[in-house]
Image (tube, rainbow, N blue to C red):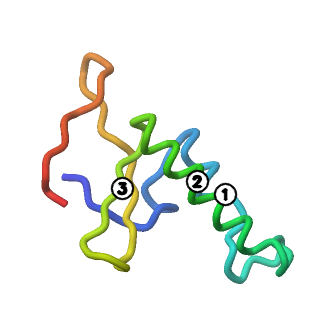
Amino acid sequence: MTLWGPTASVLTGAETAVAEAPRATGDPLVEPSMKATVLASSFAATLELVREGHLELNQHAAFAPLYVRKRQKTEDGGVAAETGNG
């Protein structure tokens, strides 16, 4: 069973780069004037990984938290079908 969780705890491999990027909130590596840019570019990168099929994105209601997880691979190397459990 795969559980939905915060981005940083569920990603591995190339997807980890997005999770390890400087956070827009409270990270001393991000200048205050760049917080919005860092947040927007991180979100755009996450959406691109979703579009390419590397990640799954789930949100239960408008303005609710977004949950991201690595997409499950099948034995033949393809991507597993959506289960509808989230």
Q: How many marks?
A: 3
Q: Earlier in the sequence, mark 2 or mark 3?
A: 2
Q: Is residue 39 above or below residue 80?
A: below
Q: Are marks 2 and 3 in contact (CB under 8 Å)?
A: no
> What x and y, as percent, mark residue 12?
50, 45
Report the residue that reaches farthest toward the front.
62
Q: Are marks 2 and 1 in contact (CB under 8 Å)?
A: yes
Q: Earlier in the sequence, mark 3 or mark 1?
A: 1
Q: Quadrant of residue 19?
A: bottom right
- Give the labeled residue for mark 3: 57
Residue count near mark 2 (Cα–Cα under 10 Å), binned few <14, some 14–19, many ≥20:
few
Q: Disc 2 on helix, strand or loop?
A: helix
Comparing labels 2 and 3, the label whose residue is closer to the camera = 2
Query: Residue type at mark 1?
Result: Ser
Between 84 and 7, which is closer to the camera in this rendering?
84
Circle on res. 44: 2
- Give the labeled residue for mark 1: 41
Left or right: 71 as drawn, with respect to 6: left
Residue count near mark 3 (Cα–Cα under 10 Å), binned few <14, some 14–19, many ≥20:
some
Q: Quadrant of residue 76?
A: top left
Residue at x 67% of width, y 80% of height: 25
Residue count near mark 1 (Cα–Cα under 10 Å), binned few <14, some 14–19, many ≥20:
few
Question: What is the CA distance from the residue labelled 3 to the residue labelled 1?
Answer: 16 Å
Q: Disc 1 on helix, strand or loop?
A: helix
Circle on res. 29: none
> What x and y, as percent, mark residue 18?
61, 53
Q: Quadrant of the C terminus?
A: bottom left
Question: What is the CA distance from the residue labelled 2 to the residue labelled 1?
Answer: 5 Å
Left or right: 17 as drawn, with respect to 52: right
> What x and y, as percent, mark residue 35?
75, 74
